[in-house]
């Protein structure tokens, strides 16, 4: 009987010890994490929240983050270098609240525990920015991205494929590093943080511009310059075509203006010495005057550029011109001829002599200028004024821009010969009044006046 009691006593004592130990441990786990509790790879079993928080802080500050590009490691850093200052207390309290402190034996004997990951890792922005600014992200060896574009070739146009390059987009790199660190990643790749082209070779707008340029490059442009046909060379047209800064199909107006100016220099008559078949002296060389025309390159260039883009008005094109005599055989066969040596004037209409007369031209001190001029105005009862004179005339036809013209001169005693040497004018062509009346009524403004 006593043996049985002893056995029971021992069993009770053992049970009391077990229950006591279990209770003691359970009470301890009221403030500590259960066995096999791991957070972000850090074992925090048997640690208080404060101790676990300290362990996690130390873990992140000493944690090494490796940054790669492809297979190459670019750089690495520890958490403390970027100013990780996170406090995990809140998350740890949340984790602790989910644990039953009385279940510690099950956790010890089981194969599973709590494995948690902490999100929203924070760090000091100023420290991170200072570290980021020193990163080896830029290099002259890196290739910058290039947009696909229309490229001019020897015969036309083609699309040049985009260049992807390997230059980092620093804003993307910075954001990606922060995101990766926040997610607890220690192996971070930067392969998706490059700057990228904004236009690719399959871009519809790019293909449309190519089609437009190809169409324009096949145009034929012909000018009718005062009866002469001139075709713009294909290579010249090609040199004008391209894209502007906005990526729009454009025509180089400066190039067009240069070409039209060259045409003007070749075909225009303004400011050019002419060979003229005179009445008495055969062919004579007459210097330039105000008569003649030029291609107005400044106005024609934008007009042609606009029509090229519209693909219209390009055949037998009439250029914009300035001056007089365009569209006719220059001086033509209706004109006034003044022979200074002969002191004689003729009026021809449609090739036939209609009128001629002796005249008095400028005296040696104020000679009548030679050149090809035109009657640019007609005026009755005008007063001709100079520095020391004011002379009224009945009929006045100015022929240049300096005050020289043809007018009646009733004060002259006679005309022709060498009278100009003694009673010559200030430069005007003095004409007998009766003849001047006839001439005034016959001619129209714009008629050429050839003085030589």
Image (cartoon, grey):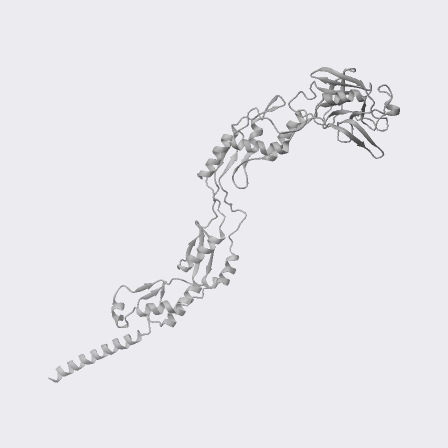
Between 233 and 388, the one nearer to me in the picture:
388
* Quarter assignment of residue 18: bottom left
**Identity of the residue furthest to the left in this view:** 1
* Quarter assignment of residue 442: top right
Whether residue 161 sits left or right of residue 378 in the image: it is left
Between 310 and 202, the one nearer to me in the picture:
310
Whether residue 228 sits left or right of residue 415 in the image: it is left
Q: Is residue 74 visible?
A: no
Between 410 and 236, the one nearer to me in the picture:
410
**Identity of the residue furthest to the right in this view:** 422
Residue 221, horizontal then vertical, whole percent: 56, 26
Residue 435, horizontal then vertical, whole percent: 78, 20
Whether residue 91 sits left or right of residue 276 in the image: it is left
Q: Is residue 166 above or below residue 95?
A: above
Q: Is residue 119 above or below residue 376?
A: below
* Residue at point 50%, 48% (across, down): 167
Q: Quadrant of the N terminus?
A: bottom left
Residue 94, horizontal then vertical, whole percent: 34, 68
Residue 88, horizontal then vertical, whole percent: 39, 67
Q: Is residue 300 above or below residue 359?
A: below
Q: Is residue 328 visible?
A: yes
């Amino acid at each position: 009987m006593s043996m049985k009691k002893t056995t029971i006593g021992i069993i009770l004592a053992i049970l009391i010890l077990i229950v006591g130990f279990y209770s003691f441990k359970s009470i301890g786990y009221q403030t500590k994490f259960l066995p096999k509790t791991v957070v972000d790879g850090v074992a925090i079993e048997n640690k208080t929240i404060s101790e676990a928080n300290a362990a996690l802080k130390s873990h992140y500050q000493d944690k090494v983050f490796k940054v790669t590009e492809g297979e190459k490691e670019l750089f690495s850093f520890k958490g403390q270098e970027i100013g990780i200052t996170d406090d995990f207390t809140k998350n740890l309290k949340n984790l602790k609240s989910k644990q039953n402190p009385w279940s510690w034996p099950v956790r010890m004997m089981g194969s599973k525990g709590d494995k948690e990951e902490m999100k929203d890792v924070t760090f000091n922005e100023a420290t991170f920015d200072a570290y980021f600014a020193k990163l080896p992200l830029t290099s002259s060896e890196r290739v910058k991205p290039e947009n696909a574009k229309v490229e001019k070739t020897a015969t036309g146009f083609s699309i040049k494929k985009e260049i992807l390059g390997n230059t980092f987009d620093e804003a993307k790199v910075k954001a990606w590093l922060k995101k990766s660190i926040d997610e607890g990643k220690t192996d971070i790749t930067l392969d998706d943080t490059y700057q990228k082209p904004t236009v690719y070779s399959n871009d519809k707008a790019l293909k449309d511009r190519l089609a437009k340029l190809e169409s324009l490059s096949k145009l034929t442009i012909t000018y009718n310059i005062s009866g002469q046909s001139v075709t713009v060379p294909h290579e010249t047209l090609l040199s004008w075509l391209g894209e502007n800064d906005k990526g729009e199909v454009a025509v180089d107006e400066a190039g067009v203006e240069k070409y039209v100016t060259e045409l003007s220099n070749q075909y225009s008559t303004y400011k050019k010495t002419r060979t003229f078949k005179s009445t008495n002296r055969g062919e004579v060389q007459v210097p330039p005057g105000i008569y003649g025309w030029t291609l107005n390159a400044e106005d024609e260039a934008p007009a042609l550029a606009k029509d090229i883009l519209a693909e219209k008005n390009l055949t037998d094109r009439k250029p914009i011109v300035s001056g007089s005599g365009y569209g006719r055989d220059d001086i033509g066969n209706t004109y006034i001829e003044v022979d200074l040596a002969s002191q004689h004037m003729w009026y021809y209409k449609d090739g036939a002599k209609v009128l001629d007369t002796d005249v008095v031209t400028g005296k040696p001190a104020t000679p009548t200028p030679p050149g090809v001029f035109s009657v640019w105005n007609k005026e009755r009862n005008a007063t001709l004024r100079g520095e020391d004179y004011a002379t009224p005339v009945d009929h006045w036809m100015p022929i240049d821009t300096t005050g020289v013209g043809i007018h009646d001169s009733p004060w002259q005693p006679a005309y022709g010969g060498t009278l100009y040497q003694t009673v010559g004018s200030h430069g005007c062509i003095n004409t007998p009044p009766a003849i001047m009346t006839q001439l005034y009524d016959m001619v129209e403004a714009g008629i050429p006046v050839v003085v030589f």
